[in-house]
Amino acid sequence: MGFLDNSGNIILDAVLTETGRKRLATGNFSISKFALGDDEIDYKLYQKNNASGSAYYDLEIMQTPVLEAFTQRNANINYGLITIPNKNLLYMPSILRNEKIPSISVSDKHNVIYLAVKDGVTYDALVTGFGGVHGGGPDYVLESGNSVGRSIILESGLDTAEITGTPANQQNYIVSQGLQERSFQVAVDNRFFVGIWGPGPGSVFNNNGGNGGEIVKFNLTPSNPTGADSNLRNYALATITAVNNAVYYRTNDARVDTATSVIKGPRSAATALTFSVKPMASNDFTRFGSTGQTVAGAAGTYSYIDSVVYVRGLYAEYQLPIRIIKKD
C-alpha cells in the first residue's frame, strides 16, 4: 500500500481486481460500468474564506494524497458516490444508533459492543463486572442467540433540526421522496456469525403512550445470512425488517420526541439487532483475535475477536464494532 503524490498532477492508477484477473484468465473480461468514491477526502478542508481568493478554496482538498488502487474488491470504495435523479431532494437520510430506550437498548463499553458467547459463564461474568444485574451491567452486553435481552436499536430518517418530525413532514420528506425504508441489509463475517435477529410481527416503535411516552417493542426473530456480499470478502447478507418509525413531534406532548428518538427531524424506520455466533474454538481466537486479555471491571481473562457489522439502508450505512468475547 502507498500514497499517490497528488500535489500537482491528476493521476489515474488502475489495477485489475482479483475478480478481474480471474475473468481475464477465462476470457470473460469486459468493463461495462465504473463507480466513483471519495474515501480519502475531508470536506472540512474546504476554505471558503481563504484570503487568496476562490481559486484556493478547494486547493487543500485537491492536493490530498489518495491511496494507490488495491486489488481486493472491498478495499477501494467504502463510501461510493451516487446519482439521484430527483433534483427536489434536499435532505438525505441517516442511520443512527439509539441508546435512549431503557432495558432494551445495549450501549457501548470500551468503544465496542460486547457479544458474549453462549457458554453459561461469559455473559454473567461481564454483567457482574460492569455493575451487576441491578447496577447497569446488562446495559453493556449482548449474549449470542438471546432474543429477549438487550439489542442494538437503529433508526433512519432526516437528522436535521430544520424540519420538525411531524406526520406531515414524514409524508412530504420521507414517503413521497421514496426514502421510506422497509428493510435493512445487514452484512456479517460468516467466519464467526451464523444468525442475525431482527424485528418480527408485533414490533412497534412510537411515542403514542400518552403525553409523548414511548411504546417500543421488538419481537426478535432469527434470519440466516446466506447471500454473499459482493463488496466484502467473507461477508454474508441478510435482509432484516424495518419497523415504521412513528415517533412524532407534537406541540402538546409533555415528553419531547427526541427523548425517544435520536433522529432530530422526520423519521423513516427503526430496527433492532442481535446476533448468534458459531461455537468458537480456542484456535479461532488465537488466529483471528486476542487471548488472555483483561477487561476493565471484570474478573479473569478473556479471549475475543473484533468484527464490524454493516447495516445498509437505501442511501446510508452504519458500522457496528462488535467484540465477540469468551471468558478463558
Image (cartoon, rainbow, N blue to C red):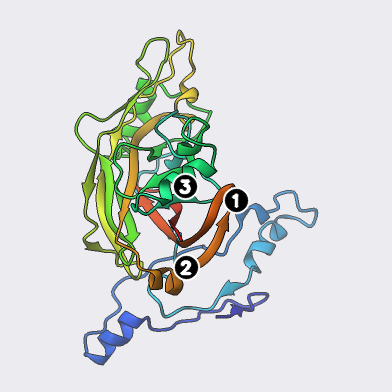
| Residue type, mark 3 in image | Ala
Q: Which sits in the foreground, 7 or 110? A: 110
> Which residue in the structure is indicated by mark 2?
289
Q: Earlier in the sequence, mark 1 or mark 2?
A: 2
The residue depicted at 70 percent of the width and 53 percent of the height is 47
Q: Is residue 34 left or right of residue 99?
A: left
Most foreground residue, 310 or 304: 304
Q: Which residue sits at x=28%, y=39%?
A: 242
How packed mark 2 is, by other alpha carbons closer than 10 Å (few <14, some 14-19, many 20 or more), is some
Q: Which residue is disc 1 drawn over?
A: 296
- Does residue 83 appear in the picture of this structure? no
Local secondary structure at mark 2: loop
Can see residue 202? Answer: yes
What residue is pinned by disc 3? 125
- Foreground mark, 2 or 3, reads 3
**Residue 189: x and y, percent?**
34, 63
Where residue 187 sits, quadrant-wise, is bottom left
Quick one: SS at disc 1?
loop
* Disc 1 versus disc 2: nearer the observer: 1
The local crowd at label 3, few if under 14, some if 14 to 19, many if 20 or more residues have their Cα within 10 Å, is: some
User: Which amino acid is tagged 2?
Assistant: Gly
78 w.r.t. 70: above or below? above
> Where does the N terminus fall, quadrant-wise?
bottom right
- The quarter of the picture where residue 61 lies is bottom right
Distance, label 1 to label 2, CA atoms, is: 18 Å
**Mark 1–mark 3 distance (CA, rounded to whole Å):** 12 Å
Q: Furthest residue to the top?
A: 252
